[in-house]
């Protein structure tokens, strides 16, 4: 047993509730300022950014000859530019947002764990952006033409730019968040909840869970579900390796 008079460094740094609330307020203020500045800058280029976001759908409309995109309400164009600025701000601010989140939980970590904060911020940001990039170049490219071909024969699509942006935003954020799977596994392993053996044994159930999540987060078609499930299964495999080297779960050694 360790010396009972030796204080735990985390306990030594433990803050009162009001200190935690002040720390949270400081982190939130930094996040809000970051979002405000990036939204202001993004709004200046909102039109060009929307053209980029709409490019996959416009290509699919041209390829299938099934319709066009349109403004259906008087204020729709302006509101779409505001939403585009917000979406762009979220992705531009993601490194700082992740950094603030990790710094908030930092005081509750041991010294050796605090050294992992920057790598975890970098990994979280990279995975979030990778999920969005994969969605744009894979899901949009193969999914949109299929969606249009599923329309009733002889019916032309008139797509509201606002509804289109809503769908795009949901998919980009959903893929970005779902790509955080290795980070989630890392923390579960560090808490001793799971290890690589648990993950290997539960692989069949995890496959079912991944496909269920993919079905919830993507449009109701097999292609979109597969396009989300495939990278998640790959990330699950990476998570097994992560758990193998980071898990604190104690297992009884088999008897000789």
Image (spheres, rainbow, N blue to C red):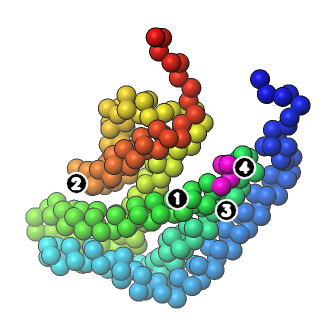
Which residue lies under the disc numbered 4? Answer: 111
Left/right of residue 172 with respect to residue 222 in the rendered view: right
The kind of secondary structure element at disc 1 is: helix
Which mark, by number, is residue 158? none
The kind of secondary structure element at disc 4 is: helix
Q: Position of residue 62 (x, y in %)?
A: 17, 79
Which residue lies under the disc numbered 2? Answer: 223
Q: How would you rate the neighbour count of disc 2 (Cα within 10 Å): few for under 14, some for 14-19, many for 20 or more? A: some
Q: Earlier in the sequence, mark 1 or mark 3?
A: 3
Left/right of residue 145 with respect to residue 201 in the rendered view: left
Q: Earlier in the sequence, mark 3 or mark 2?
A: 3
Residue 191 image-quadrant placement: top right
Q: Tell me how far mark 1 sits from mark 2, CA to CA.
A: 26 Å
**Residue appearing at x 43%, y 86% in the figure:** 47
Q: Tell me how far mark 1 sits from mark 4, CA to CA.
A: 20 Å
Q: Are marks 4 and 3 in contact (CB under 8 Å)?
A: no
Q: Position of residue 104 (x, y in %)?
A: 71, 55
Q: Tell me how far mark 1 sits from mark 3, CA to CA.
A: 12 Å
The residue furthest bottom is 44
Overall secondary structure of the magenta stretch? helix
For discs 4 and 3, the disc positioned in front in the rendered view: 4
- Counting the numbered discs, the total is 4
Is residue 114 one of those drawn in magenta?
Answer: yes
Q: Earlier in the sequence, mark 1 or mark 4?
A: 4
Which mark, by number, is residue 100? 3
Write the start and end of the magenta stretch as one range: 111-115
In the rendered image of this protein, does residue 25 appear above or below residue 185?
below
Which residue lies under the disc numbered 1? Answer: 124
């Amino acid at each position: 047993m360790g010396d009972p008079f030796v204080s735990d460094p985390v306990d030594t740094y433990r803050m009162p509730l009001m200190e935690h609330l002040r720390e949270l307020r400081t982190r939130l203020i930094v996040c809000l300022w970051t979002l405000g500045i990036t939204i202001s800058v993004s709004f200046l280029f909102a039109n060009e950014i929307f053209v980029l976001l709409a490019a996959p759908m416009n290509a699919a409309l041209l390829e299938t000859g099934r319709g066009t995109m349109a403004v259906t309400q008087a204020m729709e164009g302006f509101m779409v530019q505001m939403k585009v600025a917000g979406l762009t701000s979220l992705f531009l601010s993601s490194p700082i947002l992740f950094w603030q989140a990790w710094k908030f939980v930092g005081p509750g970590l041991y010294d050796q764990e605090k050294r992992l904060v920057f790598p975890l911020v970098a990994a979280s940001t990279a995975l979030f952006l990778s999920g969005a990039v994969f969605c744009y170049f894979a899901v949009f490219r193969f999914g949109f033409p299929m969606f249009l071909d599923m329309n009733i024969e002889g019916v032309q699509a008139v797509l509201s730019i606002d509804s289109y942006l809503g769908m795009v935003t949901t998919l980009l954020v959903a893929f970005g968040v779902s790509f955080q799977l290795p980070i989630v596994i890392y923390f579960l392993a560090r808490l001793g909840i799971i290890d690589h053996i648990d993950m290997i044994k539960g692989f069949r159930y995890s496959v079912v869970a991944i496909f269920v999540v993919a079905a919830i987060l993507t449009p109701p078609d097999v292609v979109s579900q597969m396009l989300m499930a495939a990278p998640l299964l790959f990330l699950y495999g990476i998570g097994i390796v992560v758990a193998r080297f980071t898990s604190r779960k104690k297992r009884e050694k088999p008897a000789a």
